Amino acid sequence: MADDTTSHVHDQAASPAGHVLHVADREIVARFGPMLAQVLQGLSATGLRVSFLTDETAFVDRLEGRSVDCVLVPHLQGWRGWRLQRILPERFTPAPDVVHLWGTAGLWWLKRWLSKTASAPLLVHALGVPHIESLLRRGLRHNQHVAVLSASLADPLLHRFPFVADRCHTTPPAVAPPLRPPAERDANRTLSVLCVSRLEADCGLEVLIDAVGQLRRSHCDVQVALIGAGRWLGPLWRRIHAQEARACVSLINEPELWERILPEVDVCVVPARQPEPSLAPLLAMALGKTVIASRDQFDDWFIEDRTAWQFTPGSAVELAYLLARAIEQPKHVRELSATAAEYVRDHHAVHQLISRLLALYETLTKTSLTAGTPGSHEENGGSHAA
């Protein structure tokens, strides 16, 4: 995957935050790995000291030799992250200027460490509805800020805690555009479709399987890969068998595999609203793939007939029509690919996210001295749940 950070980051002045600790667990890496790798490397290229704490071994290997100080721990999530109370002060003394937590895994331990040993601000990057729900349960401390993928994601948080509006920051995700446009699909080749989703009920997978069944009965040649993690494999297989789609649907319980498969597919489908969004559809747009999504997405980058084709939520008939359209209307496919790729270049470039983060770290560093001012909100209780 091409990386657009090289020609941009060296022109950016590093934030006054000399050292930023990033934290992300394996679930976040599975959903946003390409973005994390590019952002961490890009931030380091500006002269910022970048550390990364994770429980994902493969991602640490990916960053080896990239000027990012990586610390691998057994667990970040919930009570199993108890080792952090020893690892954090051992590895990060003096404390970093800013702690950037992607998601909420390890949040309890990070807050405990910062409250005892440092006044560094904590930036919690909410990458889905479950992260917002966690913050609603816990509340926000005076030195805690929130970043969100899209403004609508923050609405419940701001409704509950309106006084934190100045500590809530919208930072859209980013991808590196490809070096060259993809080759046009061969009309005689089987249409390949990728869906990256939780393999659970209510994720829209039944809709996709039913749509594939309709296409097969209409003698459309299609091959679908469902990639994700979950325990709902039995009902999914029964649905696939009922639709007589066994020969053209693959279930892959390896969440990280989508990044390798995506460049080779024709279509990326988002069959229902994503409470835990993946970077896959945005990267598919940048790669010139056809993106088809239900019309109830909260993410700003799903724009009908500009970045994606959209269908009525729950309508397998409409989804089947759009998949058939991807086969039968190459001219419209080319038009959508061009406008989607242009949109991603203009609004979701990696260097743009790096600039936003540098400015945000500077703001957090300057305001950290005001920690403890009146009007702050402390969470109640001491649950270890992430």
Image (spheres, grey):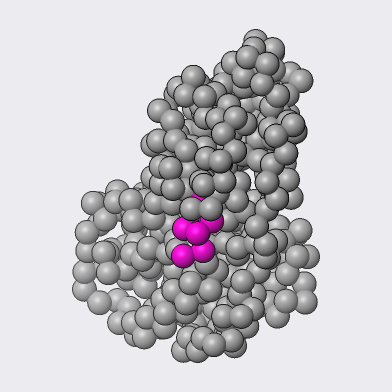
Decide if residue 34 is on the left or right side of residue 188. Answer: left
Residue depicted at x 60% and y 63%:
177
Q: Position of residue 53 (x, y in %)?
A: 64, 67
Decide if residue 84 is on the left or right side of residue 97. Answer: right
Q: Position of residue 349 (x, y in %)?
A: 52, 67
Residue 42 can be seen, yes or no: yes
Give yes or no for residue 344 being in the magenta stretch: yes
Residue depicted at x 57% and y 56%:
286
Is 293 in front, or is 23? Answer: 293
Please state the extent of the stretch shown in magenta in the rendering.
Answer: 340-346
Is 92 in front, or is 103? Answer: 103
Q: Position of residue 324 (x, y in %)?
A: 58, 26
Say above or below: 69 vs 180.
Answer: below
Q: Position of residue 249 (x, y in %)?
A: 71, 26
Residue 110 can be seen, yes or no: no
Is 157 in front, or is 3? Answer: 3
